[in-house]
Amino acid sequence: MLGHKLRRLRRDRGLTQAALAERLGISASYLNLIERNQRPVTIDLLLKIGRLFDLDLQSFAEDDAARLSAALGEVFGDPLFEGEDIRRQDLIDFAEASPAAAQAVVNLYRAYRDAATARPVEDPAGTLAPAGAALALERVRDALQAAGNHFPALEEAAEALSADAGLGSRVALPALAAHLDQHYGTRVRIMPAEVMAGVLRRYDTHGRRILLNEMLPPPARLFQLLAQFALVHHRALIVRLLADARLDGEAADLGGLALAHYFAGAAMMPYDAVYRAATAARYDIDVVAARFDVGFEQACHRLTTLGRPGARGVPFFLVKVDRAGNVAKRLSAGGMQLPSFGGACPRWVLHDAFRTPGRTRVQLAEMPDGARFLAVARTVEGPGLGHGEPPRLHALMLGCDAAHAAQTVYADGLALAVDAAATPIGPHCRACDRLDCADRAHPPAGHRLAVDLNQRGALPFGYEPAPATR
């Protein structure tokens, strides 16, 4: 049932139902039934859609039901629903039959958790957002994932600026500053840290000046300058993309920031150039970062955006956490459904990265359902703003399905087909059925604790068998 995806694709291309039905050789009424998920997309029709729109059929055919059912599993794994007769298959059926309603349930639960916890969270750009913004953040993350984290219109605008301003040189910042002054009447100033008062960048609307904090390293200065340029001079494009994603209010504000940062990354690393560099270097992150004079995190984030038809990169997922395990960035892709609620699995190599700052760690991991993933992790530092505001340390993990692992340098030497080579992991603890895991922080949903006073294992308790509801 891919009707919701086909409807979104049709609208993105500006086609009416009648026009698309004619191109596909079917009736408009039949297409209407498909778009309302009352008829399935057949293989023959899927092939026609792929040829018509030049799509990667594997990515298009990956139904959102997997993501939604995983999110619903987290929702109904909450102790709030303990004792309810809700089976896994019920959640899968719900997600497949009514994706919009399933998403509404997930959004409602997010709002409940947001109100219940009332704690600060981090936005897609990695900066602190006020309490109460969690639902808006999740809407933005869902919108990025629904678009495959690829926005052709932003790519085109970024490539045009990159070519016009000569951003391929090592003196990109002065070249861009001169270009903005000459063609847009916008001046760029590097300001003392004490004047910026802890702000990375500021736009002076009256003086048409973009002010950058002197504490930013050169790549970060260029990135912030490009992001502010996008917010000022490509505002109409960003607003249109936000409307297409049905983001409003706080979600639109955060989504605009995420799209501006997307533009900045695309301008610093134009698509064709970064795709060629990444594939030639077998996705060696350090090589890509050096080639474009960017940091490890910027290179990783750009690698998640390579979704252009005919030149698709490896579908990477990305997650970034702080020392306490709080998720600052998250992008699911390639079959990996990262948890929306609770921290990442403690067995992820992501957490080991903090023990070896600056070193790249590699892991082959296996989920409870047998799906395997290659993960690469390293610590990253944000910009420091002086003695009172030192750099914040995070761990960043980039990963992909094991089926794509051989395309990367990080799979060299790994026994991808050997069972013992993979680390058993799971989603967050309440949604994980690995009862023998000594690293879990919470009991799995549907299992009651069983404490035996006459013996002690790795954990001080065991679990009673799960009822039939699971």
Image (tube, rainbow, N blue to C red):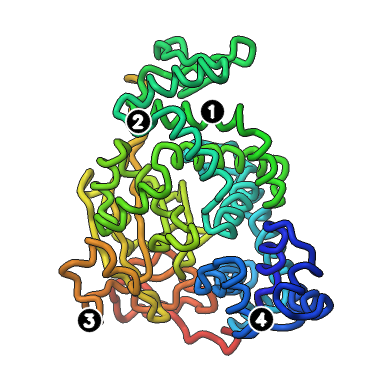
Q: CA distance from mark 2 to mark 3?
A: 41 Å
Q: CA distance from mark 1 to mark 3?
A: 48 Å
Residue at (29%, 47%) from the top-left corner? 288
* Outermost residue to the bottom: 468
Nearer-N-terminus badge (1/3): 1
Q: Is residue 82 visible?
A: yes
- In the image, residue 254 sits, relative to residue 459, either above or below, namely above
Residue at (33%, 48%) from the top-left corner? 395
Type of amino acid under label 4: Val
The location of residue 251, given as percent across then percent down, is 66, 44
Q: Nearer the viewer, residue 456 or 55?
A: 55
Mark sitting on residue 228: 1
Type of amino acid under label 2: Pro
Q: Nearer the viewer, residue 237 or 459?
A: 237
Q: CA distance from mark 2 to mark 4?
A: 46 Å
The location of residue 470, given as percent across then percent down, is 56, 84
Residue 289, located in which quarter of the rendered image? Answer: top left
Where disc 3 sits, the SS reads: loop
Mark sitting on residue 41: 4
Mark sitting on residue 190: none
